[in-house]
Amino acid sequence: MSSDGHPPIFRGGRRGVLLALSSPSGAGKTTLSKRLLSQNPDMVLSVSTTTRQPRPGEVDGEDYNFVTVEAFKAQIEAGEFFEWAEVFGRYYGTPKALVLNAIEDGRDVIFDIDWQGAQALAAQAAEDTVRVFILPPSLDLLEDRLSKRGQDTPQIIKDRMARAKDEISHWHEYDYVIVNDDFARALDKLNQILHAERLKRSRHPWLNGFVDALMAE
């Protein structure tokens, strides 16, 4: 639905796919989402707004919109988020304008998002949201990946590993699950999911008129 409560006009000829990717930290969803974007130039990344501090190498406005807690709460009050959640005292939210404009243009949006965000996204746009959970091949390998990133202290890594099992416990809520034991294979599966979802009958409202015209011949 559009912001005024009316069905949107799909200027791109089809409904856009809202592709929500979730995984425990270190399982590869961010790398997969960036590669998928590079292979699908008509796709856009939903840049979330967050109150957490930037990690080394992260760019404001590209990786996240970094704001203060006060600014985030003001945006909640203004109704500027499509969905938002508080995770361990940090806030994360999806700006509403980008999502609504993309759907109306028939463009696809990819979300690098946790299970709470994916759940909220699906609740807001059940017909448009496709949820994909990325699993690591093992927890030992996941911990090794986190250690090799060199971005977190041993205590933070320990906390992330404790949280990983909680995140993985939500895998059954997703439409698709990919085990990222081989990056190229996981990326190929992700592309297959995207292209199949683009072809769904429900994403092509123009077909109603097309079939009516066929039947009238």
Image (cartoon, rainbow, N blue to C red):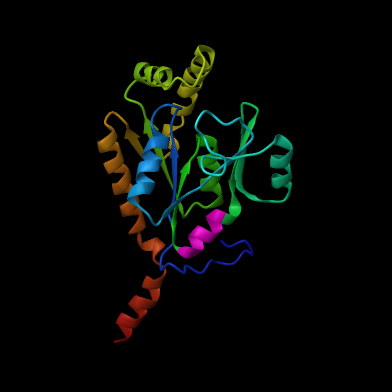
> How far from the left and from the top, in percent, is residue 180?
32, 31
Q: Main secondary structure of the magenta part?
A: helix
Q: Nearer the viewer, residue 101 or 67?
A: 67
Decide whether residue 172 is among the magenta residues: no
Residue at the spot x=33%, y=59% of the render? 199
Image quarter in which the C terminus is found: bottom left
Q: Nearer the viewer, residue 96 or 177?
A: 96
Residue at the spot x=60%, y=52% of the render? 96
The reply, left or right, for residue 2 in relation to residue 140 is: right
Q: Nearer the viewer, residue 117 or 99?
A: 99
Image quarter in which the N terminus is found: bottom right
Q: In the rendered image, which quarter is residue 176 located in?
A: top left
Residue at the spot x=62%, y=26% of the render? 88
Could one spot residue 175 in this view of the protein?
Answer: no
**Against 184, is 80 above or below?**
below
Could one spot residue 217 in this view of the protein?
Answer: yes
**Against 50, is 45 above or below?**
below
The residue segment tinted magenta is 98-105
Residue at far bottom of view: 217
> How far from the left and from the top, in percent, is residue 24?
45, 28
**Against 192, is 159 above or below?**
above
Q: How many marks?
A: 0
